Image (cartoon, rainbow, N blue to C red):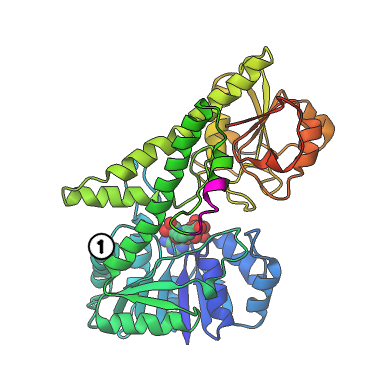
Amino acid sequence: MRIAIVGLGYVGLPLSFQFARSGVSVLGLDIDTVKVDLLNQGKSYIKHLPDEIVAEVVRSGAFSASSDFSRIREVEAVIICVPTPLNKNREPDISYILETGRGIARFLRKGMLVALESTSYPGTTDEDLREVLQIGSGLEAGRDFHLAFSPEREDPGNPDSKVAIIPKIVGGLTPACLEKAVALYSKAVKTVVPVSSCRVAEAAKLLENTFRSINIALVNELKVVYTAMGIDIWEVINAARTKPFGFMPFYPGPGLGGHCIPIDPFYLTWKAREFGQHTRFIELAGEINTAMPSYVVHRVADALNERQKAVKGSSILVVGLAYKPNVDDERESPSYVLMEMLSERGAKVAYYDPYVPVIRPTREHAHWAGTKSVAWNRETISSHDLVLIATNHACVNYQELAEWANCIVDTRNAMACVPTRQGQVSKA
Ligand SMILES: NC(=O)c1ccc[n+]([C@@H]2O[C@H](COP(=O)([O-])OP(=O)(O)OC[C@H]3O[C@@H](n4cnc5c(N)ncnc54)[C@H](O)[C@@H]3O)[C@@H](O)[C@H]2O)c1
């Protein structure tokens, strides 16, 4: 069987490799020709996907990449894994899905399957994508071609997160669409979970991510409340998590990051309005989570104040630019918000992240582009008035940090594992 996977990013790439290793021939399609060229040379551009994996599937002939959409003629099924961000008004931007749909439609043939994986609101597959596919191809979904939605459950940086063993929800437009999609995913994934429609599958993904966003907001709020009461939230969570039923630990942080949790719930909020419904939990969680960087900046100011210093004129080192530990993905990272807020207040801001040696040019953080991670040594670290731990990569030597840094504000409880001096560390 030969399939195409459109969008060779954090989701599409591991999925491609899993299919390729399961005996399915994969054509990876992406508009980014730099990625396409790298992949065809057997090279990865994502830290947790080593070159050897890419080289293996390219060498075996099971995977190749291209930017030529006309090659969709060669395949039986197309899986779409393109971005679904929010626009500047924080509304869903499904333009990448629609663009991809138009690109596919011209080459769609009878009997083919199109499956969407990008997270979006219920109705994206059977309304929006269906429409562009039908208009562009002159074919009818459910009669001439199959249409399905199967949400991605990628967890970058988690060594236990393997595409093959994570159960995969699949919803189809018709029972025949579902059957076709289940048959496809069963080739690469151990457990496929069929549901009655594309909308149920879309809604399940939004429930999963909204659940995380709300629970993170809860512990973020409790962090502020318990700190005011002189109680350590981390100790509280570690105690509560000993309960063997009915509790699941979530941890506070400097604010939400990444491409899913801060964004996906607002896809639901937007769609719910069409039905006259309000998503108050989602809005409240968003409000609490987006207030976290401001709380952290106040804690930084307090820590400096203790040392007769002001934020203005102080040199502050942010440790960890990636949005979560052990990944090289710094898109939507709260570290940027912290750096921005601190530099607006007159601090001299630098960062250390071994996974992000230099900040790439992006639209959102244009003026940080080209900024390099500082070196990791006593002289550099001790030259800063304050070190702010924003992301707790496991590879950072926190023992050395304790020896070298004057003052540390820790948003991740990273310093709990090493001895520190009295008053050296404050949590935020
Ligand atoms: N990253 C995650 O951990 C994660 C987890 C679960 C779900 N998701 C969802 O999966 C989807 C993809 O996320 P991602 O992190 O892989 O994004 P990504 O930005 O890493 O990758 C998307 C890829 O699509 C390509 N692309 C964009 N427009 C295209 C087009 N018209 N045609 C072909 N290629 C195109 C980009 O060049 C890029 O390589 C999103 O909906 C996201 O919400 C992501």
Q: Residue furthest top?
A: 308
Q: What residue lies at 47% left-to-right and 87% top-to-bottom?
A: 1
Location of the C terminus (image quadrant)? top right
When asked about the image quadrant of residue 317, the answer is: top right
Q: Is residue 236 above or below residue 367?
A: below
How far across and down, in percent of the image, does residue 160 sit? 60, 66
Q: Position of residue 302 (x, y in %)?
A: 59, 20
Whether residue 55 is visible, yes or no, is: yes
Task: Judge whether residue 241 is colored magenta.
Answer: yes
- Eyeballing the image, is 293 above or below 362? above
- Secondary structure beneath dot 1 equals loop
Residue 261: percent from left, percent from top: 44, 50
Pinpoint residue 197: horizontal percent, then vertical percent. Answer: 27, 72
Q: Is residue 204 magenta?
A: no
Residue type marked 1: Gly
Instruction: Please give the name of the residue rendered at 62% of the width and 68% of the height, measured from the top-left corner.
Output: 39
> Which residue is at the front of the view, 138 or 57?
57
Q: Main secondary structure of the magenta part?
A: loop
Let me know if residue 73 appears in the view: no
Which residue corresponds to the image point at 32% horizontal and 72% vertical from the top-left? 105
Q: How many marks?
A: 1
Q: Which quarter of the figure has residue 168?
A: bottom left
Q: Count residues near mark 1 (Cα–Cα under 10 Å), then give few for <14, some for 14-19, many for 20+.
A: some
Which one is in front, 318 or 253? Answer: 253
Tell me the magenta residue range: 239-244
Q: Is residue 24 above or below residue 45?
A: below
Q: Indicate whether 57 appears above or below 239.
A: below
Is the distance from the Cβ of mark 1 to the nearest ligand 1 atom less than 8 Å? no
Residue carrying label 1: 123
